[in-house]
Image (spheres, coloured by chain):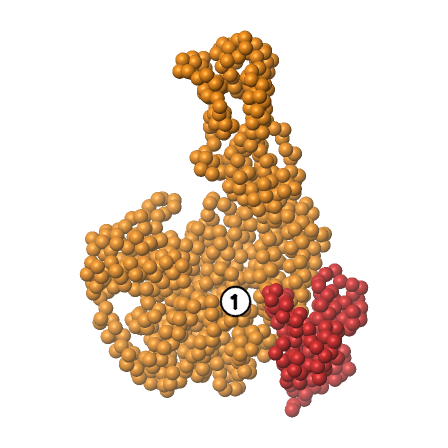
Chain colours: A orange, B red
Amino acid sequence: MARLSSSADLKKLRQEILSQRDPDRPCVTICSGTGCQCHRSEEVVDAFVHQIENLGLQGRVDLRCTGCHGFCERGPIVVIFPQQICYLGVDTKDVSEIVSQTLIENKLVKRLLYKDVETGQHVAYENEIPFYKNQKRIVFGSNQLIDPKRIDDYIALGGYFALDKALFEMGRDKVLQVVKDANLRGRGGGGFPAGIKWETTRNAPGEPKYVIVNADEGDPGAYMDRSLLEGNPHSVLEGLIIGAYAIGSHEGFIYVRQEYPLAVQNITIALEQAREYGLLGANILGSGFDFDVQIHRGAGAFVSGESSALMTAIEGRVAEPRPKYIRTAVSGIEGKPSTLNNVETWANVPLIINNGADWYRSIGTEGSKGTKIFSLVGKVNNTGLVEVPMGTTLREIIFDIGGGIPNGKKFKVVQTGGPSGGCIPESLLDMPVDFDKLTTVGSMMGSGGMVVMDEDTCMVDVARYFTDFLTQESCGKCVPCREGLRQMLNILKNICDGRGKEGDIELLEEISEVMKDASLCALGATAPNPVLSTIKYFRDEYEAHIQKKRCPAKVCRELITYYILPERCQACLICARNCPTGAITGGKHLIHVIDQEKCTKCGICFEVCPSRFNAVVKLSGEPVPPPVPKITKPILLVEDEVIFRESLRDWLTEGGYQVTTTGDGEEALKVIRGQEFDTIILDLKLPGKDGIEVLKEAKSQKPSLKAIIITAYPSPETATEAMKAGAIDYLIKPFNPEMLERVIAGVTEAKAEVTPETNER
Amino acid sequence: MESIRLEIDGKFVEAQEGMTILQAARGAGIDIPTLCHDERLAPYGACRLCTVEITKDNRTRLVASCVYLVEEGLVVETNSERVNKIRKMLLELLLPLAPTGPLESLARKYGLEGSRFTAEQTSCVLCGLCVRYCAEIKKANAIGFIGRGIDREVAFLPEVAPKVCASCRECFAICPGGKLASETDGVRFPISIWQSKQELR
């Protein structure tokens, strides 16, 4: 690599890169972000390399390992340029077909295309898939066009031209003015105007001044910063260099979580390559501006993402927030002026410089300009990263892009802004999303996490979950946050466990207010949000837990009981066999009953009961109905040999059948006249009337009666005669209980409906 | 040093630039309660009992007076209803941890008879006075915080404490909860307790 020492050098380099590339040559891009790597996208890459070599296509087909495309639900994602044919969920075994069909014969592999759920139509091109079509991916869109490990890919797209423009055309003041005019607000949570922060640092006394990338993304379910840093590290770096130039900083830090190995790797490579080109280091592009960056790897504390805690960590101390009455922009790392912005904020900067403040301001809402990347996760069909203009409604994000809620369930809430964000109910789905709107409804933008929850979610349990997370992740320094969270968690646990008391809701609110007012940092001040927003929109659920000991969503274990609906139970034994505590009684033909004393509420019975039956239900806030008396269809056993009769009776009784016995044919007919039986088990050789005669008479009296003949003296003649007389089966003595069970099962309705899966178990 | 004029509880107070509101108030004989503050140590801002209401440019907000520096024309309320409500709740939250000693009398002063909360009685309110005293004054770093969030606690560091603590014991006197003295016989330190807790984690 030759060092670039002027603006002309950069332009020349780009020309050289472009001249070596043929835009019409097929290029296979494979998403190699962390999400797709978990779906083994690296093996897919290897398979493509082999296949291309085997078919001698080298030089005619390009291969590119890109960053995250965003549609993580359906990875690994392969997009073939120039047509942008998009294959989803690609496996190594699909590769030869893609190469032979699409690359050689120019045909589509239909089964790997996106299929519209409603119309059943296949969608071949990425930009026509609803997930992508409804987005505006100005920041994130380049991810799929570049290999993050190759700076040339970024430069080919015009990368570092914003830096060039800033250094040689605009100058420091103009850069700052444009960023201010664009009203770029910080994407990390607070939404503080970046330009004003830059200006504060620039004007603050003290040298050196620092610029910092906050890549300590820690919200559960949020990963947009990771994907941006992994997939397009140079865009973040270019933004940082431009910011440093405007501020007058010569030293920068990228604070990235150690748990993001690929992001660490890609940004490390990006820094090396930028240094080699002279885009970083002394005298950048010959402009006289010096700037370099260090990577600081975070040691895994959520609170490190708080700006003052992060700066404390960079200083080499435990990441604890400190009072920020003097802004970190004035007194940050080692008390020096320090501007910290989130990954996404920095990545917006080159766009603003290239396209101007007016362009940027044309996107978004009055107070929030540009786009925002959201991490759309939870109970939503299209999990992934979504970039939309500020002001897009939640409904558009969750339903048009996210594809709605899986399994036909109903939407309940979306939790935005990470653990200290709030829950937004269905009634607010048409609200346009921006910094200010989210705050007014009791949530916040945060870094852009969006966790969608369906009707099976208990809001008290959600509040408990997030509060629990925060009790672990608070630094524990200040009293309102530490002790407030400790007690809020206690109260929430009590409510979920059925020990909630009158006044608990008010006490939660009282603690929350003090936490908001008195906490040292934003973590503590926003920590009550999950509790307050769920109380605000779902107070009735709290009240049901406290007053009626009822969990309306039937989630809180201590407040629910599992119950088997007798009218639905098909006596298939699946639940009984899977119950780990042996709490389910009942046999074949015997409706199953859960012994509530033994039940540990693990919910396995609920899950294994076949969906056609749906016999296991959860009850909450209502008593468990008493077990119904055993309703089994009675059996009449006619056998003259006493020992055999008694042992047979015992077998049947243990199996749950109601059995009447007799040793005499006449007696049997008498019993049948007076009582309803489902099945008769009949010995052939009886004193007096023999079995066949009894069978004939019995069938004439009760045609629906099912008869099983048993005999120690079998012959084809008697068997035929018995079957003609209406017997259903013919068993030869001796036989074991299982054989008899099978035969009886074969003649009963319940058994007839029992499914193959029962038999497999 | 420039002189700064501000108003605290309706009283005009003259303070030096760089002073905190707490220093200015105490200098003027106005008491603000604190738990984690010690004049000899750097301001820490953890107990939040010293929270006061300030008004500046028609904007009122709550700040910790031990870390907020005085400003010209600042109006400070150290005893407002809002402030007292916060202090009362903070004391109620802390009381189960260390129900006797200075906390008890302070709680009574704010009208608390007891606490609605329960917690393990550790005799430690995690004010960090011992930790900071040992680090800043003694420069020994023999005691420190371990754990995070609600698991945070103070512990003697086994590599250092046995060498320096027996001859010092100065942190005993500044502990508002009486924890340190109760945990050691003054010669040996309960390192074994600390280690077994670590193993349990």
Q: Is residue A34 visible?
A: yes
The picture quadrant where one finds residue B150 is bottom right
Q: In the figure, is residue A84 to the left or right of A493? A: left
Which element is circle 1 on? Answer: loop
Task: Name the residue that disc number 1 marks.
Answer: A189
Please give the name of the residue rendered at 55% of the width and 21% of the height, measured from the top-left corner. Answer: A644
- Residue A193 picture location, percent across and down: 50, 72
Q: Residues within 10 Å of mark 1 (few under 14, many from 20)?
A: some
Q: Is residue B64 visible?
A: no
Q: In the figure, is residue A13 to the left or right of A227? A: left
Viewer-proximal residue among A637 and A425 = A637
Vertical arrangement, residue A248 with respect to residue A351, above or below: below
Q: Residue furthest top?
A: A688
Q: Residue furthest bottom?
A: B1
Please give the name of the residue rendered at 53% of the width and 8% of the height, measured from the top-left corner. Answer: A689
- Give the amino acid at mark 1: Gly
Vertical arrangement, residue A161 with respect to residue A378, above or below: below
Viewer-proximal residue among A652 and A49 = A652
- Residue B45 picture location, percent across and down: 65, 76
Q: In the figure, is residue A263 to the left or right of B135? A: left
Please give the name of the residue rendered at 79% of the width and 66% of the height, measured from the top-left corner. Answer: B111
Vertical arrangement, residue A259 with respect to residue A134, above or below: below
Chain letter of the residue carrying label 1? A
- Residue A102 picture location, percent across and down: 24, 54
